[in-house]
Image: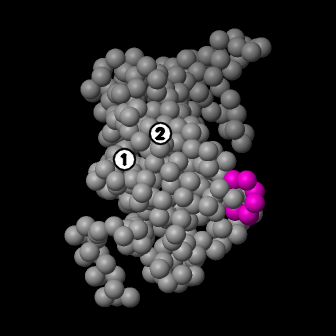
Amino acid sequence: MSDFFHSFNAVRGMQAGRPCYIAMCPMRIIPKIFVFNEEEVPPEIRSQRKLNKGRIPEMTNYLINNQKDYILSSLTASIDGETEFEPYSSDGPGVNIGTFKISMDAQILINDGQHRRAAIEEAVKHESALGHDHISVVFFLDDGLKKSQQMFADLNKHAVRPSPSLSTLYDQREELSNIARRVMNDVYIFSKLTETEQTSISNRSIKLFTLSGIKNANKALLNKGKNDHISEEEIQIAIEYWKHVASSIRDWNLASERQVNSWELRENYIHAHGVFLHALGILGAQLIHNKKGQSVLDKLSTIDWSRGSNLWKGRAVVNGRITKSITNVKLTTNQIKMQLGMKLTNEEVEREKEFKLHA
């Protein structure tokens, strides 16, 4: 072992017959000892993906803005160089607890967590106090490039991001997620018919809406960005708006009382899909801005929402399938406004001309 080395209190374990070591590292030293393969190196001779710099500011801000309430999962790194483990005892539990030494000549590469590493580096620059916090690191001994590449593939192939609906259900920080849950709980129809875990709804589910769909609709309704503040008054406006919409859609009420099958509504009507909720969000924003509401929304009950109607062809329905691209959401909004006798904005008029030109 070299006379110069990094030293960590660590726990030793075994995976697939190979030793690994878990240590808590002060965040201030993370950028200094963990090397990221430079972006210029071709992918076939490096062991991880290119750094996506667009992800770094959001992660950095998360750490800076939540210094008392953030959480970071472990980094995984491989060591190419000399190491030594000195257990605290020669037998018993202490045999796998001790001091893990890594030669300063060794190269330590991150196999999983390079974006966390970059965010930590930026966050510590702005808030030095974060440098005294710790992050857990799992160290493996490097068996060469092919093994490191396989480690990266294995670590990422089974990673599954939570669905947008489940993230919305659990996210206590983002105000749009908070209002989505408030609306879901306070609007009776939504409380009965909202899927909170999945982004798509299975064929035989009794649900009609997804929590992520409600979130997107509220984002449009209140014209809010991801980090914008939402007042209690605005939340109440949203709740009352959706209550009134719900009272005007008879099929929703029948579904909530199990007098009609939700899957039949999804199969036959556009009002049972996210494109409709999003369109109603855009429509509602305009009604709120123009101080119109109840009398207009009452007319929703008179519109033909059937999927086969020519009203929705090329708008909510394309080639027989429901589509919720932003263009189709806006075209659906136009049609709803026209059916309600509302005047289109100049932008909406131009969109209608373009739509009819290519129809």
Q: Quadrant of residue 205?
A: bottom right
Tag 2 residue: 179
Along the line of sight, which residue is nearer the eye, 357 or 10?
Answer: 357
- Asked if residue 145 is positioned above or below residue 340 in the image, the reply reads above
- Count residues near mark 2 (Cα–Cα under 10 Å), then give few for <14, some for 14-19, many for 20+: many
Asked whether disc 2 touches disc 1, contact meaning CB atoms under 8 Å apart, the reply is: yes
Is residue 51 found left or right of 261 in the rendered image?
left
- Residue pictured at 47% horizontal, 64% vertical: 299
Along the line of sight, which residue is nearer the eye, 106 or 313?
Answer: 313
Q: Is residue 120 visible?
A: no
Tag 1 residue: 222
Q: Which amino acid does the dot numbered 2 rest on? A: Ile
Is 258 contained in the magenta span?
yes
The picture places residue 349, in percent across and down from the top left corner, at 26, 75
Q: Quadrant of residue 67?
A: top left
- Asked if residue 148 is positioned above or below residue 283 in the image, the reply reads above
- Residue pictured at 65% horizontal, 17% vertical: 97
* Colour treatment of the image: one colour
Query: Of helix, strand and loop, which mostly describes the magenta segment?
Result: loop
Q: Which amino acid does the dot numbered 1 rest on? A: Leu
Along the line of sight, which residue is nearer the eye, 6 or 133?
Answer: 133
Cα distance between the residues tagged 2 and 1? 11 Å
Q: Quadrant of residue 346?
A: bottom left
- Asked if residue 288 is positioned above or below residue 33 in the image, the reply reads below
- Count residues near mark 1 (Cα–Cα under 10 Å), then give few for <14, some for 14-19, many for 20+: many
- The region drawn magenta spans 256-262
Is residue 208 found left or right of 327 in the rendered image?
right
Along the line of sight, which residue is nearer the eye, 226 or 261?
Answer: 261
Residue furthest left in the image: 346
SS for tag 2?
helix
The picture places residue 266, in percent across and down from the top left corner, at 64, 68
